[in-house]
Image (tube, grey):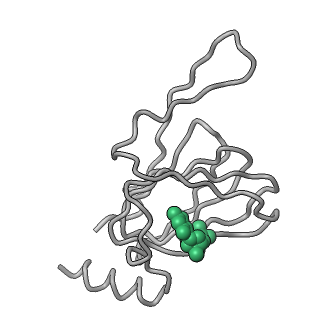
Amino acid sequence: MNTIDDCHIIHFPRLSSDRNGNLTVADNLPFTVKRVYYIYDVPGGESRGEHAHYELFQTIVAASGSFTVILDDGTHRKRVFLNKPYEGLFLPPGIWHHLVDFASGSVVLSLNSAPYDENDYMRDYEQFIEYRRGNDAD
Ligand code: TYD
């Protein structure tokens, strides 16, 4: 099963030109993107997420603003602060994640390997821990 050490930052290419502003291309993901969603209008200091997936691969980007992702593999936890639109947090299946401490006006861009499927979610932490115990014992 994946651990928090399998979650890592992907650096996206940044194109510099004489144009105003910057442009980043997310063309170096280790999975094919089947779905993109974004989260916005989160009040400052609030949180989102708190779930894990059975199969889904994701990459989460702070397209604007900042927030912290708390990663949990059932044994260890770590916090990853995201505030750069040219960095994505690669998140494989089986990792509980909680997005906290939103700066007001932040935009979460989520790049996903599969269409939306509620059956792919673990939304109950105890259910997640039992799933991890069962699989980590193999
Ligand atoms: P949810 O997963 O609860 O948000 P969070 O990121 O805070 O955990 O999603 C909020 C609602 O949106 C929920 O009813 C499921 C729905 N939803 C879709 O219909 N399609 C999607 O692609 C996503 C990500 C969520």
Going by the image, does 90 lie left or right of 83? left
Quadrant containing ligand 1: bottom right
112 versus 127 height, above or below: above
Image location of residue 9, percent across then percent down:
48, 45
Going by the image, does 134 lie left or right of 6? left
Image location of residue 47, percent across then percent down:
69, 69
The residue at the point 26 percent across, 85 percent down is 134
Q: Nearer the viewer, residue 3 or 35?
A: 35
User: Furthest residue to the top?
Assistant: 18
Is residue 58 visible from the viewing direction of this image? yes
Q: Quadrant of residue 100?
A: bottom right
The residue at the point 41 percent across, 88 percent down is 127
Is residue 49 visible from the viewing direction of this image? no
Quadrant of image for the C terminus: bottom left
65 versus 96 height, above or below: above
Q: Quadrant of residue 22?
A: top right
52 versus 65 height, above or below: below
Going by the image, does 91 lie left or right of 22? left
Image location of residue 1, percent across then percent down:
28, 68
18 versus 71 height, above or below: above
Q: Nearer the viewer, residue 95 or 113?
A: 113
Image location of residue 26, percent across then percent down:
48, 35
The residue at the point 51 percent across, 30 percent down is 25
Figure disc tally: 0
